[in-house]
Image (cartoon, rainbow, N blue to C red):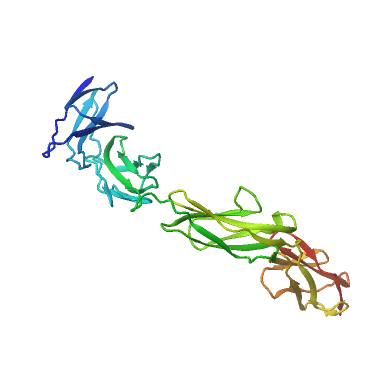
Amino acid sequence: MTASVSFPANDPEGGPVLKDLWIGQSNGASGSCCYTGSTTSVQLNNAGVYRFSTTAIDQELNFSTRPSAVVKVGGASGEPPIASATLDRSSGAVPLTVNIDMSASSDPDGTVQSYYMSCGDGGFTFGSQSPFGSCRYDTPGVYWLMLQAQDNSGNVDLVSAYVVATPVPGGPDTENPTVSITSPISGAHVSGNVSITANATDNVGVTQVDFFLDSGTTPIGSVTSSPYRITWDSGTTSPGSHSLSAKAKDAAGNTGTSTAVPITVDATTLPQISITSPANGTTVQRKSIVSITASVTPGSYAVSRVDFLVNSGLACSDATSPYSCNWSVPTKANPKTYQLQANAYDTKGNMVPSTIVTVSVGR
């Protein structure tokens, strides 16, 4: 079937007028821009419910109302949805974020179930059940948005919108951000997990800060908002002299690099642990509760837990300092002596055992 479409339009100011044409159908849609004539023809090859809609745009990007018509082919029944979209802004300086509200979309004989939002710059939201979305533009230009609503029968309708992203006032942003590492300080000795902090500023705004080790090109960490801080595992590199640097980037793609900060990575140290109670050689009583306590000095990494063992079997674990375990001495103690040991684990999975403490069981 061939459908003839007539969509005359004129601008009261006498300027040129362009028209877009949207065709929504079951499980699909298409849109075209920019027609200058008043008529066109469209081939409809499949049975289904089609909604034709059009909008005229003048050279100032003013929009006309949006007339539409429904065409049913091959005995198809039902009504397509009616898409509606509101933008919180249609222009602004980059970086520009436009919030989209399609909650006013409706369906005459069903419900709207999903929304599709094409931002015009490659950004796309596919099949969201939420009528709310956003598009971000970092490059100046005019962008054509395609916004689609789909109902529970698979029928769709589309609306269009234009967004004008303008350069930063005063011309293109060519000013580089400035960035410096504030921690660790120059010459610091570090080990384990190290907090690296940077201070970054820009005349428009910093969008990302990357952190680097030595002359590496792959960041050891990145952040997109202040405070610009990462945690770096120094155990992943060799002990010795190294340097840290940071690179800041703004929305225009300008970058600034910090001065390298020299540091020394110390060799990884393990935790130290000893049982402080009971003392070696202590006599304990049957059926009593014995408190086993341990003293732990962390190494390069924080202590994650302490396991308490009695004759090599796990009695209990403690993840909080001070580390202790209540051991129930058996009623019928056999053997007559028990070996107590505590194992300290750090957050890297390293384990260090204590010296064994032997206790005897009295009557």
Position of 333 with respect to 85 (left or right) is: right
- Up-down relation of residue 123 to residue 78 (above or below): below
Give the tally of numbered discs: 0
In terms of image quadrants, where is residue 84?
top left
- Up-down relation of residue 324 to residue 67 (above or below): below
- Up-down relation of residue 174 to residue 77 (above or below): below
Residue under the image location 85 percent in, 70 percent down:
356
**Given the current orientation, which residue lies at the most extreme left position?**
12
Position of 229 with respect to 174 (left or right) is: right
Examine the rendering and report whether any part of residue 229 can be seen: yes
Q: Position of residue 155 (x, y in %)?
A: 29, 34
Q: Position of residue 144 (x, y in %)?
A: 31, 39
Q: Nearer the viewer, residue 201 or 158?
A: 201
Residue under the image location 27 percent in, 37 percent down:
158
Q: Nearer the viewer, residue 226 or 324?
A: 226
In terms of image quadrants, where is residue 272?
bottom right
Q: Nearer the viewer, residue 92 or 77?
A: 92
Q: Position of residue 110 (x, y in %)?
A: 26, 41
Q: Position of residue 241 (x, y in %)?
A: 73, 58
In terms of image quadrants, where is residue 68?
top left
Q: Nearer the viewer, residue 317 or 321?
A: 321
Q: Quadrant of the N terminus?
A: top left
